Image (cartoon, helix red, strand yellow):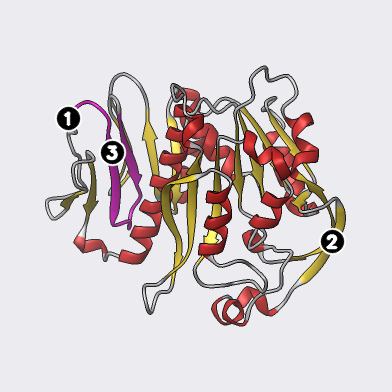
Amino acid sequence: MQTAYRRLLKLMPRLGLQVTDLGPGTAVVSRRGGRIRIPLGPGADVLARDNGRYTVAGAGTDAWVVRRRASRVQQEQSGPESTTVRLGDSGASLLLDPAAGSDERKLQLAAAEYLCHQHVAGMLELYDVNCVFDVGANRGQYARRLRRFGYTGRIVSFEPTAEHFATLEKAAADDPDWWVYPYGLGREDTTSTIHTGWNTMNSLLPPSDYGKGRYVRFSTTDTEEIQIRRLDSMMEKALDGIDTPRPFLKMDTQGYDLEVFAGGGDRVAEFVGLQSEVALLRLYEGSPPMNEAIGVYEAAGFGITGMYPVTREADTGRVIEFDCVMMRADAAPGKS
């Protein structure tokens, strides 16, 4: 089932469909014009409709995220027991199937991730962004999501670890406006040692006691020597050929985002917006608390447009990290 599902998702862009994968058995499909329904098997369909977004609901999943733009939503459900939860006046709904056994925490985080991607795509369009700096690119997940959500401008990705850079380089090979560099970014041009073997959580910082208690992966680690560059030293090359650059800075460096930002120097004023992972509960030693990080960004002229939880404690419900999206209001087109 899952193999067929993955093959179908890969095929859909060739059919003019936009696909956003939300996790095992769940994705979002959209297209302009018409409506399509593709059966995948018992309890699993692909749904797309005019000016709307519907999910692919795999067998065993318990939730759909449905979003509309202009036209009235005609909802499709997996069975008579499904219930609809409207999200205020936004035109969005959550469809729940009680028989599947809802996991509220996973549902909330999946919805937050989807809404964050939607919000970022909207901000890139609103602010006429034409170059996204993808710092902490890992295997290229963020850049691929940008493309799926319709962003067509330049992407410049930075990933310092050899294993993940090799995967990133392959992912970008067929996209001429997606550039990749094997560097980390920081406060100065130097070499440093990064902790590896933590998958998406590789960091230049060691784990905190809290982090060790939360993630088993932190119990063992390898290290790798990497090259670090200042952000401002990379900007001229990254923006080459863009007549009127309007860059956006995405940082996901596991506690190192403020160091990346500091390396921008006075040139951070050229960015119209940014996205940073900010922490309420410290996973890495030496990482800044959320209020400190946001204070630095606000002092540089950025204002919050969206906050989306990334991880939560299962036993307390406390948010550990947020994806924080911030824009420079005076850079919005039409602002004087």
Q: Secondary structure under badge 3?
A: strand
- Which amino acid, mark 1? Arg
From what the image shows, is residue 52 above or below residue 166? above
Residue identifier under label 3: 67
Picture coordinates of residue 296, whole percent (x, y): 58, 54
Task: Please tell me how many numbered marks the rendered image carries.
Answer: 3
**CA gap, disc 2 to disc 1?**
54 Å
Residue identifier under label 1: 72
Q: Quadrant of residue 81?
A: bottom left
Of mark 1 and mark 3, the one earlier in the sequence is: 3
- Which amino acid, mark 3? Arg
Give the mark toward the camera: 3 or 2. 2
**CA gap, disc 3 to disc 2?**
44 Å
Question: How many C-alpha atoms fall within 10 Å of the one at disc 2: few (<14), some, or many (≥20)?
Answer: few
Q: Nearer the viewer, residue 171 or 304?
A: 304
Residue positioned 50% across, 34% down in the render: 148
Do tag 2 and tag 1 residues touch (Cβ < 8 Å)? Answer: no
Residue positioned 26% across, 66% down in the render: 101
Of mark 2 and mark 1, the one earlier in the sequence is: 1
From what the image shows, is residue 316 above or below residue 332? below
Residue 336 appears in the picture as rendered: yes
Q: Nearer the viewer, residue 271 or 25?
A: 271
